[in-house]
Amino acid sequence: VKHKSLLNDEQRSVWRRFMRLQAELTRRLDEELRAEMGIGLNALEVLWLLAIARSNKLRMTDLADHLVFTRSGVTRLVDRLEREGLVLRENVDEDLRGRYTILTRKGFDLFEEAARLHVDALGELFFDKLDTRQLKQFNALLCRVGEGLGESY
Amino acid sequence: VKHKSLLNDEQRSVWRRFMRLQAELTRRLDEELRAEMGIGLNALEVLWLLAIARSNKLRMTDLADHLVFTRSGVTRLVDRLEREGLVLRENVDEDLRGRYTILTRKGFDLFEEAARLHVDALGELFFDKLDTRQLKQFNALLCRVGEGLGESY
DNA sequence: GAAGATTGATCGATCAATCTTC
DNA sequence: GAAGATTGATCGATCAATCTTC
């Protein structure tokens, strides 16, 4: 049996490349980060959100809103970070349902080093390959495709 | 404490958009496919590889080489497909270590319907938003970034 | 000893259910 | 009853170890 596809070659090529590039980049960045710093890409993003937040603290909901995660996923991830002493949790005074996740000194220090590492790797794997014009183009294309997919995309 | 980042705004924007766009598209495509056809995106890719293969069969290694998966991941995925009767396994005559995965009639029929669905969704979410020139640009950028990351990227 | 494939243990995420406070 | 957060069960993947054939 033979299959007749409904995408043309260029479309199939773009789609496969897009998916594979993301997978490969994620794999490499995550691997390096785990090997050198003992945390994954997702953990780094949590630390980053906390590092730029006012007082270095955020509620679970705020974290979940800025991540690709479900609420329960965020809970588990923060559990792990807490176990390693990178963050701690604290009740929210004005709303007894809420919990803050707070970046510790240890967490901040680790974040800074991990961020440097990550940004270097990202430069090598991604940004060094594009000039300013190409970067602008890329951004425009991503915006175009992401349009209407949800607020922050 | 305050964090000084080493990426400029445009770079950070591109990277976040790239990762999020991929995550969101994957999530939606996978969800739709699961709801309508009971298989995920990865399973569809296996069925696709088999559908375009000679005699509709491939060895585990061939599958693994064309997927983002590890060998054991492929084994488990094919296990599931076999349980649902979409593929079956058979020994390789010339090499007793090897196993073929063979697309069944049921698997092919399901693949055809799933592929139609998937391609339609992909059109709506992705290709309809780009004209020919933009598609070419996108492809060029992906190639550029993927250069030197591994053969097929 | 290497290559092809699988298995057992584990990891990191989701979903649905639950608990508490609003 | 809804919102914030967590928990128990499960899913889909990986890794390291293993088995068989080369």
Image: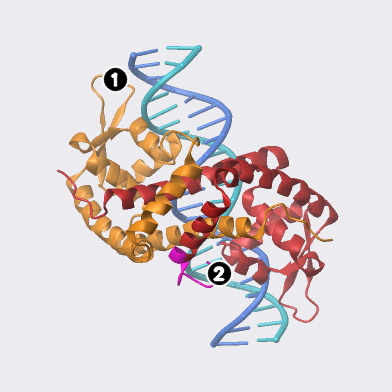
Chain colours: A orange, B red, C blue, D cyan
* Residue A97 can be seen in this image: yes
Residue B127, x across and y down, in percent: 59, 47
Q: Which residue is pictured at 56% across the width and 64% down the height?
A: B70
- Residue D14's place in the image compared with B35, above or below, is below
Q: Chain of mark 2?
A: B
Q: Which residue is pictured at 31% across the width and 46% down the height?
A: A81
Q: Check disc 2 and report the residue beneath it.
A: B152
Q: Which residue is pictured at 78% across the width and 75% down the height?
A: B92
Horizontal side of residue A52 vs B23, given as left or right:
left
Cβ–Cβ below 8 Å for labels 1 and 2?
A: no
Q: Say few, some or many: other residues with alpha carbon within 10 Å of mark 1 (under 14 / 14 to 19 / 20 or more).
A: few
Residue B96, x across and y down, in percent: 75, 78
Q: Check disc 1 and report the residue beneath it.
A: A95
Horizontal side of residue B143 vs A108, given as left or right:
right
SS assignment at label 1: loop
Stretch in magenta: B144-153
